[in-house]
Image (spheres, rainbow, N blue to C red):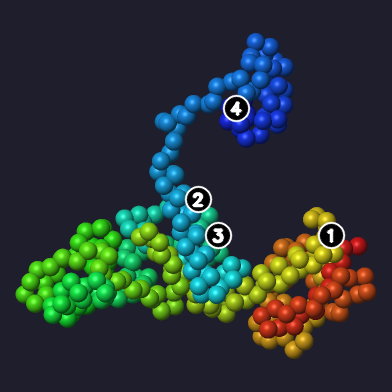
Amino acid sequence: VLVKLTRLLAPFTPFVTESIYQNLVRESRTEAYESVHHTYWPEVDAAAIDHDMLNQMALARQIASLGLAARSTANQKVRQPLAKAMAYAGGVNSLRPELVEIVTDELNVKTFEFVEEAGKLVNYHILPDNKLLGPKFGALFPAVRAALVAMDPAAVVAALQSGQPLKLVAGGQEIELAPNEVVIQTTPVEGLAVSSDKNVNVALDVTLTPELKAEGLAREIVRRVQDMRKKANFNIEDRIVTYYQAENPGPMLRDVLANWTEYLCAETLTVELVNAYPTKDCYVETQQVEDETLLLGVKRAG
């Protein structure tokens, strides 16, 4: 395997792969090619390609990308955990468990699921393209517009996304509309942030419960302490003592400092979390966290 990998990487990292090849091959097999650059390019084993896995991974990446776009639209930081992510991907309604784990971790959501209809994530509004259809149908255009608006939006979207013309009856006439002659407007279902691309819709439940808000605040405090560790030039493995003082803390900050102690300590390698003003040998910063003023001090554990 290593030899094949060396041959594969040789055009991109010629000197490193040459050194590896000489050590792995030439020292034990003097009859081998003198250089890795004299060997043949590895042949593809088509039978070993897992096309289903590749398709699943491509979908997982698309879902993650759209989910992050939905987060951005809703102005939700990635560190803020959310309850659920949902996706509509046409006929696909499952991902391998390991890919579901990747998606939930990437989007920082508690659960992920597929829905059977895109209408559970977005509301569709179907309108004619006035600039194209007005001149095309003239006096018949109001009837075309009325007939289009009266149709089931989900059925219209399904027909148009398949690339087929849309058939309807207006003014006693059967007519066909091309996909580019119909305007599809979407609005997220209340409480959801949605992003769509190539017939895939991904929605995030952006309703924040007190528990989710508290977890998000705890993660933000961890990020601030981790940043202070770097500024204080601590080693990655250093255990620390963390001091904190809050000026008139709100109920959520009090809850986090009281009930998330184990998490805060584990994530920052804090051996002691002290509710007191930092000592003189601490690295100290005043942090503004979710409209709260928090004085933090860190030092290496003695």
Residue 274 numbered tag: none
Which badge, 2 or 1, comes first in the chain's sequence?
A: 2
Amino acid marked by disc 4 = Arg
Name which residue lies at 43% across and 70% down: 194
Name which residue lies at 44% across and 36% down: 49
Name which residue lies at 42% across and 31% down: 46
Amino acid marked by disc 3 = Glu
Q: Which residue is mark 1?
A: 234
Which badge, 1 or 3, comes first in the chain's sequence?
A: 3
For the residue labelled by badge 4, is the local secondary structure a helix, a strand or a loop?
A: helix
Q: Furthest-bottom residue in view?
A: 248
For the residue labelled by badge 1, is the local secondary structure a helix, a strand or a loop?
A: loop
Disc 2 versus disc 4: distance between alpha carbons? 30 Å
Q: Residues within 10 Å of mark 2 (few under 14, many from 20)?
A: few
Disc 3 versus disc 4: distance between alpha carbons? 34 Å
Residue 98 numbered tag: 2
In which quadrant of the rendered view does residue 279 lie? bottom right
Q: Are marks 2 and 3 in contact (CB under 8 Å)?
A: no
Residue 106 numbered tag: 3
| Mark 2 vs mark 3: in front | 3
Horizontal placement of 143 versus 200: left or right? left
> Residue 189 at x, y = what percent?
38, 76
> Residue 278 at x, y = what percent?
87, 76
Q: Furthest-right residue in view?
A: 280
> Residue 167 at x, y = what percent?
15, 66
In which quadrant of the rendered view does residue 296 lie? bottom right
Q: Residues within 10 Å of mark 4 (few under 14, many from 20)?
A: many
Disc 1 versus disc 3: distance between alpha carbons? 28 Å
Q: Which residue is mark 4?
A: 7
For the residue labelled by badge 2, is the local secondary structure a helix, a strand or a loop?
A: helix
Which badge, 2 or 3, comes first in the chain's sequence?
A: 2
Horizontal placement of 126 versus 275: left or right? left
